[in-house]
Image (cartoon, rainbow, N blue to C red):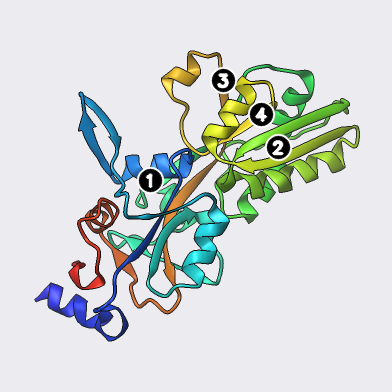
């Protein structure tokens, strides 16, 4: 009976239509965390690997996911909470709303850390990292719907130099605002923020192309063994998004896993 009642909600515009699910590319930290949190995996030779169906559409940035869902009333994707805007609808997961309060009290469990990784330290990097823990940076982080982890007074050492930061598209908009604010405090510094994905960010610092990598997942053991060190910038949540015309308000974790593993392809097959 519950399934019948649930289907009646979506029947008017969704029943006969496929779920146009969208995922991020394999180098994406957001995809890596999404796969881990929903256990979208299979075991090969004793190791868990990504099991997102090859039939799921792949996009290479947060912005493309947002645009795709905005323009397709049958689409479904996932993005950072901070990237959510009024053109999209975020679904409850297991009947829990994705908001700051529920992330803080751990009732909304689809969350992750935003990390900044380095290999080589410098006085300018250290000054910038100290700014990122400041009261001023905390306000920027909070205003963009992320959760800061530390707050203290900050006074820049006014060091000169240039930093290149590259990596996760989920972090880049936040990082650009933080970098701009720091350059207002320390006018001797120049910071360039380049958007790609977490894996590309890590590759860029390993190859001495960038100074700081934006990584929207935990560092892998193999990366730590190469000398990478990380700092947590903020806590974030991943939200499941649909078009505003989509009548869905909630999905179970199992439904999400089944959609992305290709076991559910039509809205009519969803259940509470």
Residue bearing the label numbered 1: 34
Q: Residues within 10 Å of mark 3 (few under 14, many from 20)?
A: some
Residue 86 to residue 139: above or below: below
Q: Nearer the viewer, mark 3 or mark 4?
A: 4
Residue at 84 percent of width and 35 percent of height: 190
Residue 18 to residue 32: above or below: below
Instruction: Name the quarter where the N terminus is drawn.
Output: bottom left
Residue at 68 percent of width and 50 percent of height: 140
Q: Residue furthest left?
A: 1
Q: Nearer the viewer, mark 4 or mark 2?
A: 4
Q: Nearer the viewer, mark 3 or mark 1?
A: 1
In the rendered structure, are the residues bearing label 2 and label 1 in contact, judged by CB atoms less than 8 Å apart?
no
Residue at 45 percent of width and 41 percent of height: 112
Dot 2 or dot 3, earlier in sequence:
2
Q: Residues within 10 Å of mark 1 (few under 14, many from 20)?
A: many
Dot 2 or dot 1, earlier in sequence:
1
Which quadrant of the view contains residue 92?
Answer: bottom left
Q: CA distance from mark 1 to mark 4?
A: 23 Å
Q: Secondary structure at mark 4?
A: strand
Residue bearing the label numbered 2: 134
Q: Residue furthest right?
A: 188
Q: Nearer the viewer, mark 2 or mark 1?
A: 1
Dot 3 or dot 4, earlier in sequence:
4
Dot 1 or dot 4, earlier in sequence:
1
Q: Which mark is residue 229?
A: 3
Q: Secondary structure at mark 2?
A: loop
Q: CA distance from mark 2 to mark 1?
A: 29 Å
Which quadrant of the view contains residue 36?
Answer: top left
Residue at 54 percent of width and 53 percent of height: 62
Q: Residues within 10 Å of mark 4 (few under 14, many from 20)?
A: many
């Amino acid at each position: 009976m519950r399934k019948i009642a649930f289907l009646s909600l979506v029947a008017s515009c969704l029943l006969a239509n496929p779920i146009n699910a969208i995922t991020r590319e394999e180098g994406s930290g957001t995809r890596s965390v999404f796969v881990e949190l929903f256990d979208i995996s299979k075991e090969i030779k004793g190791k868990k690997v990504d099991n997102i169906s090859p039939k799921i559409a792949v996009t290479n940035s947060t912005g493309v996911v947002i645009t795709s869902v905005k323009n397709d009333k049958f689409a479904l994707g996932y993005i950072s909470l901070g990237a959510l805007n009024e053109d999209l609808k975020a679904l409850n997961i297991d009947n829990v709303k994705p908001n700051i309060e529920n992330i803080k009290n751990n009732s909304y469990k689809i969350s992750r850390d935003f990390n900044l990784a380095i290999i080589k330290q410098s006085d300018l990097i250290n000054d910038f990292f100290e700014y990122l823990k400041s009261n001023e940076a905390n306000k920027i982080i909070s205003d963009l719907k992320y959760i800061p982890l530390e707050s203290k007074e900050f006074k820049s050492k006014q060091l000169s130099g240039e930093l290149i930061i590259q990596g996760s598209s989920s972090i880049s908009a936040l990082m650009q605002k933080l970098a701009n604010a720091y350059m207002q405090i320390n006018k001797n510094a120049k910071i360039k923020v380049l958007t790609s994905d977490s894996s590309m960010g890590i590759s860029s610092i390993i190859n001495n192309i960038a100074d700081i990598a934006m990584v929207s997942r935990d560092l892998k053991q193999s990366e730590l063994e190469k000398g990478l060190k990380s700092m947590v910038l903020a806590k974030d949540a991943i939200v499941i998004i649909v078009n505003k015309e989509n009548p869905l308000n909630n999905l179970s974790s199992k439904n999400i896993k089944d959609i992305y593993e290709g076991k559910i392809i039509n809205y009519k097959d969803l259940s509470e």
